Amino acid sequence: ASQCMRQSVLTVLLLSLDLASAMRIVLQRVKSASVTVEDAVVSSIGRGVLALVGLREGDTTADLEYCAKKLCAAKLWENEEGKGWRKAARQLDYELLLVSQFTLYGDVSNKKHVPDFKRSMKTAEALEAYGAFKAMVAQAHGDADKVKDGVFGAMMDVQLINDGPVTLIIESPGGGSSSGGGRGRYCHRRTEGDGGRDCKAADPSRGFD
């Protein structure tokens, strides 16, 4: 009985972890980076950050805001005195290159080892959430012209010179707990009267709301 109870508790914990939403970003400090689509360079940056952006089913506006702020605030460079990890891209007026990357939630734990992307946010919703995220990053950085991106959903060739190399992962706390957001849509603003959440897609031009 004791063993069964422990197994049940473990199962519940694993299910809870799997259900908890967490937006994921893999960021790389670069000397330069570019995105090419169909043999044409669509975006390029000099010194700055290349960010692979993964959206998970159930991510909320709170997840987007958290990751946007962390991405722009990450101190990856030394300061004027030569002390490392003291300056962020926005402080040095460096650029950011965002690349949508649903494969960050690929799961190859199945017996056939075929990637399963069921945890990734669905395409239509992810497109709107990604647009909102880019607007938030532009606002957090302070200079929208310094924030570039690839082409959502396209086959892209991504080239970079990793500076260091330095590669870090940012994940939101998950579940949109700070905003009360539900699963299945990223939630933007409260509806009037019922105290709930309006889970329709946010207007990307609004940024933080």
Image (spheres, rainbow, N blue to C red):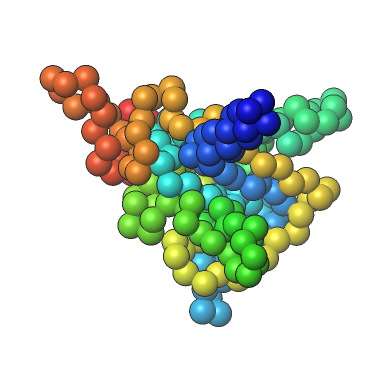
Q: Tell me the residue at 65%/58% (across/down).
A: 109
* The C terminus lies in quadrant: top left
* Quadrant of residue 181 within the rendered picture: top left
Outermost residue toward the front in this view: 1
Q: Is 190 left, or right, of 36 in this rendering?
A: left
Is 170 or 44 nearer to us in this picture? 170
Q: Tell me the residue at 47%/69% (across/down).
A: 154
Q: Is 15 left, or right, of 127 in this rendering?
A: right
How far from the left and from the top, in percent, is residue 74? 66, 33
Above or below residue 98? Residue 208 is above
Q: Tell me the residue at 21%/19% (across/down).
A: 195
Outermost residue toward the right in this view: 82
Above or below residue 163? Residue 66 is above
Q: Is 187 left, or right, of 45 in this rendering?
A: left
* The N terminus lies in quadrant: top right
How far from the left and from the top, in percent, is residue 16? 52, 34
Count of numbered marks: 0
How far from the left and from the top, in percent, is residue 94? 63, 43
Would residue 3 be visible to someone looking at this image? yes
Is 111 or 146 nearer to us in this picture? 111
Q: Tell me the residue at 19%/27% (across/down).
A: 191
Outermost residue toward the left in this view: 193
Is 113 or 139 nearer to us in this picture? 113
Would residue 95 be visible to someone looking at this image? no
How far from the left and from the top, in percent, is residue 22? 52, 38
